[in-house]
Image (tube, rainbow, N blue to C red):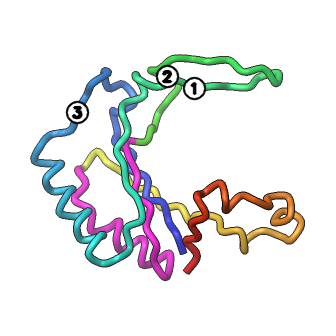
């Protein structure tokens, strides 16, 4: 089973462009990332620039509209993510519990939908999807 652990740092929604984390916090996080890697569960990870450097595309009325960040209505935003492959939701939760996050950070854990999770008609409609993922299959 693949799970995405989403880091949600409070206050990041209003961070200025170029805002960077503290070096000590990064060092602690790197130790955690190395534990994930050594355990063989880490598939991918990345940090994200603040929303002030991003854009949103909305489709009201079926027409695309681009809004540059920051986004006034944002209450929670992503600061980064880990993609892990573990045997259960509980194991994903245990990995999240080990994270050296600060008091203003939340980790949301979401299971990734696998093709086998979908009904046959949806699987047929999605033919070729796995090739779009670089041919990599992450199923356990």
Residue at 30% of width from left, 21% of height from top? 16
**Dividing the image into 4 quarters, which one contains the C terminus?**
bottom right
Disc assigned to residue 80: none
In this rendering, the label closer to the viewer, 2 or 1: 1
Label 2: which residue? 71
Residue 16, compared with residue 4, is above or below; it is: above
Which residue corresponds to the image point at 32% horizontal and 21% vertical from the top-left?
17
Q: Is residue 70 magenta?
A: no
| Residue 129 figure quarter | bottom right
Taking the image as shown, residue 69 lies to the left or right of residue 113, namely: left
Q: Name the residue under label 1.
A: 56
The mark that comes first in sequence, 2 or 1, is 1
Q: Where is residue 12 in the image (x, y as percent from the top left)?
A: 34, 33
What residue range appears in magenta? 79-102
**Which secondary structure, mark 1?**
strand
Q: Is residue 130 left or right of residue 84?
A: right
Mark 2 Cα-neighbour bin, 10 Å: few <14, some 14–19, many ≥20: some
Q: Mark 3 points at which residue?
A: 20
């Amino acid at each position: 089973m693949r799970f995405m652990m989403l880091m949600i740092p409070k206050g990041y929604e209003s961070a200025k462009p170029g805002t960077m984390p503290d070096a000590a916090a990064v060092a602690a996080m790197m130790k955690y990332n190395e534990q994930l890697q050594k355990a063989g569960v880490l598939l991918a990870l990345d940090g994200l620039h603040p929303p002030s450097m991003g854009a949103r595309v909305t489709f009201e009325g079926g027409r695309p509209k681009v809004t540059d960040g920051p986004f006034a209505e944002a209450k929670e935003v992503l600061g980064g993510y880990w993609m892990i492959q573990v045997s259960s939701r509980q194991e994903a939760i245990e990995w999240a519990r080990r994270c050296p996050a600060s008091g203003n950070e939340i980790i949301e854990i979401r299971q990734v939908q696998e093709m086998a999770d979908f009904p046959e008609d949806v699987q047929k409609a999605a033919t070729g999807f796995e090739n779009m993922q670089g041919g990599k299959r992450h199923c356990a």
